[in-house]
Image (cartoon, rainbow, N blue to C red):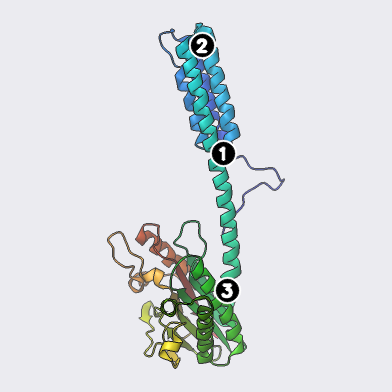
Amino acid sequence: MRHAWGRADGHRPWRTGHALVAIPLVLIFVITVADLLTPREIELSPLLITAPAITASFSGPWVTGSVGVLSFAGEMVVSAHDGTIADRPVQTQFAAAVVVTVFLVLFSYLRERHQKVLTRVRSVSEAAQRALLRPLPARLGSLRLASMYLAAEEEAQIGGDLYAAARTDSRARIVIGDVRGKGLPSVSDAALLLGSFREAARRHATLPDVARYLDQSVRSDLDEHTEDLEQAQENFITAAVIEIPHDRAVIEMIDCGHPPPLLLRDHQVMTLDAARPAPPLGLGELADPLYEVETFDFKAGDTLLLYTDGVIEARGRGGEFYPLADRLMSWEGDGPETLVRHVRDDLLAYVGGRLGDDAAMVAIQRLPD
């Protein structure tokens, strides 16, 4: 989330760039005065070109051009004082200063335009993220939830990882998934699955019906947009579909080729491996899955962590995969919010600040009745 800092009276805050402009201005003054006070044999005026060069590193074309004009004026003052303004070397120096200043102004203009485009791209991606990956509610009945999304691509806010939650009168349903592939097609597939889940979670009575509906939705979309059968079989979505009844301390899950969730209880970490996993969504026609429900205890105080393979397949500096279950043993906090923040900070530190794939997490804690 970005925060906009400003004053309550509506005036724009003082920017760092405004203060930095003082550096080239002082530099022009010091070099000009020093050149006037030193003997003619010591020429300092060629150093004035450093002023617009410094300005171009942090300011826009107008300020860079203005500083360039002032530095050129300083050179003129020094040359007029020394009586060398008509000399050919000095005129060559003037021409070089003009050419360099023009290029610096052009550089500042192109950089400023690129920054504006980048700002628009960020705003669009943030809007897409809010529309597609809606924030999970902090509470669903007796459940507390928290989520985290880490995009691997620079300037991107969303990719092919997804999660969503829905509540009915008697239960809460959560899905987490990972679209095979990257780029815009994966975002489109993620949007399709999220829309299908939000409809199916309230429409179908049983969890197998929800999973079957999601598989059919993915297959229908692939059949519509993919002509090559082999290519269609290479496109799928791994997902874990979770159902948590309000009146029973259990988790019901159908794992469709997704990494198994982790259950944290009394400072112990347990892996909820599915004994009968289903194939990834989109491949149901090939395997004819039964979508059998796996049931696990989920007591008050327990915390369930759902995640995508971008977490456990992240590599450290030595090439080793991130050991999520082992690293959770060091977590001593309380609540799903602190858990996802702990994993995020530890994961980024482990990989050196840059992920090779998108990563998503959802933490769910059961509160006492």
* 349, 310: nearer the viewer: 310
Closer to the eye: label 2 or 1 = 1
Question: Which quadrant would the N terminus be assigned to in this image?
Answer: bottom right
Residue that carries the numbered disc 2 in the rendered image: 79
Label 3: state its secondary structure.
loop
Query: Which amino acid, mark 3?
Result: Ala
Residue 92 drawn at (x, y percent): 47, 17
Sequence-wise, the earlier of marks 2 and 1 is: 2
The residue positioned 39% from the left and 64% from the top of the image is 347
Tell whether 225 sits left or right of 229. right
Closer to the eye: label 2 or 3 = 2
Sequence-wise, the earlier of marks 2 and 3 is: 2
Label 1: state its secondary structure.
helix
Residue that carries the numbered disc 3 in the rendered image: 138
Q: CA distance from mark 2 to mark 3?
A: 71 Å
Task: Answer above or below: position of 105 versus 253.
Answer: above
Q: Are marks 2 and 3 in contact (CB under 8 Å)?
A: no
Residue 365 drawn at (x, y percent): 49, 78
For label 1, count other residues whose C-alpha is less than 10 Å away and answer few (under 14), some (14-19) or many (20+).
some
Picture quadrant where residue 308 is located: bottom left
Q: Is residue 10 visible?
A: yes
Query: Which amino acid, mark 1?
Result: Tyr
The residue positioned 48% from the left and 22% from the top of the image is 96
Residue that carries the numbered disc 1 in the rendered image: 109
The residue positioned 59% from the left and 40% from the top of the image is 15
Q: CA distance from mark 3 to mark 1?
A: 45 Å
Taking the view exactly as shown, the residue that stands out farthest to the right is: 9
Residue 303 drawn at (x, y percent): 46, 78
Q: Are marks 2 and 1 in contact (CB under 8 Å)?
A: no
Taking the view exactly as shown, the residue that stands out farthest to the front is: 227
Q: CA distance from mark 2 to mark 1?
A: 30 Å
Residue 202 drawn at (x, y percent): 61, 86
